[in-house]
Amino acid sequence: MLVESRVKRLIPVLAAVFVASLPVPALFCGVDAQERMEAWPSGGVTPQRISMGVGKSRIIDLPQDAAEIFVANPKVANAVVRSPRKLYVIGMAAGKTSIFALDQHDRKIADLDLDIGPYIPAYSIEIDIRKLQQMLRAVMPAAAITAREANGSIILTGRFGRRGATRR
């Protein structure tokens, strides 16, 4: 009886898993799988995480010519196209947004995941994250520490190479 009850509860779950595992084009009528797959962007691009403050900008070099740029929330960030391979990204307001660059075949060539921190003049300190990481590697070469900026703060993640390194 207990086994039968569990089996009855498991059947809807298995049915949902089966439907979810079907290829997406099989769910559409009148369109063959090859046409559907070619129409969608490839999505094989690794998202690049960028943190910066309001009023700050970054130059983004694209791997190939972009035909279209999409900004998810233009109130948070703006993208200015300077050339087919160069993009200026400007933080407009605190928040999160995404920017995608597509090539002439609508394939994704860039995926930017932006975190725009608030502008706080009294506590605003310009820190070059790359320079900070270089200094950390010079002082603690055995440590695997990554520095990143988020909402006006610096976050250090990773681990030290040996127990005594934490005392430095």
Image: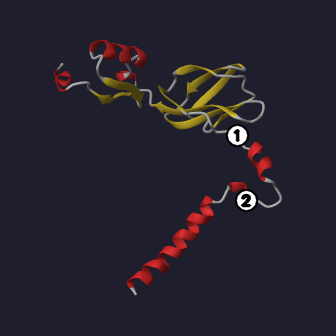
Please state, as top left, top right, bottom left or bottom right, where the N terminus lies in the image.
bottom left
* Residue 152 percent across, percent down from the top left: 39, 28
Which labelled disc corresponds to residue 119? none
State the image quarter where residue 88 is shown: top right
Q: Secondary structure at mark 2?
A: helix
Please state, as top left, top right, bottom left or bottom right, where the C terminus lies in the image.
top left
Q: CA distance from mark 2 to mark 1?
A: 18 Å
Residue at the location (41% across, 31% down)?
Answer: 150
Q: Please name the residue that numbered disc 2 is placed on.
A: 26
Residue at the location (42% across, 17% down)?
Answer: 130
Please tell me whether residue 27 is drawn above or below residue 85 in the rendered image: below
Disc nearer the start of the sequence (2/1): 2
Question: Dot 1: few (<14), some (14–19), or many (≥20) neighbours within 10 Å?
Answer: some
State the image quarter where residue 61 is shown: top right
Q: Please name the residue that numbered disc 1 is placed on.
A: 41
Residue at the location (27% across, 17% down)?
Answer: 140
Q: Amino acid at mark 1?
A: Pro
Please tell me whether residue 21 is drawn above or below residue 56 in the rendered image: below
In this picture, residue 166 sits left or right of residue 97: left
In this picture, residue 134 sits left or right of residue 14: left
- Compare residues 81 and 18 and report the one nearer the observer: 18
- Compare residues 44 and 49 and report the one nearer the observer: 44
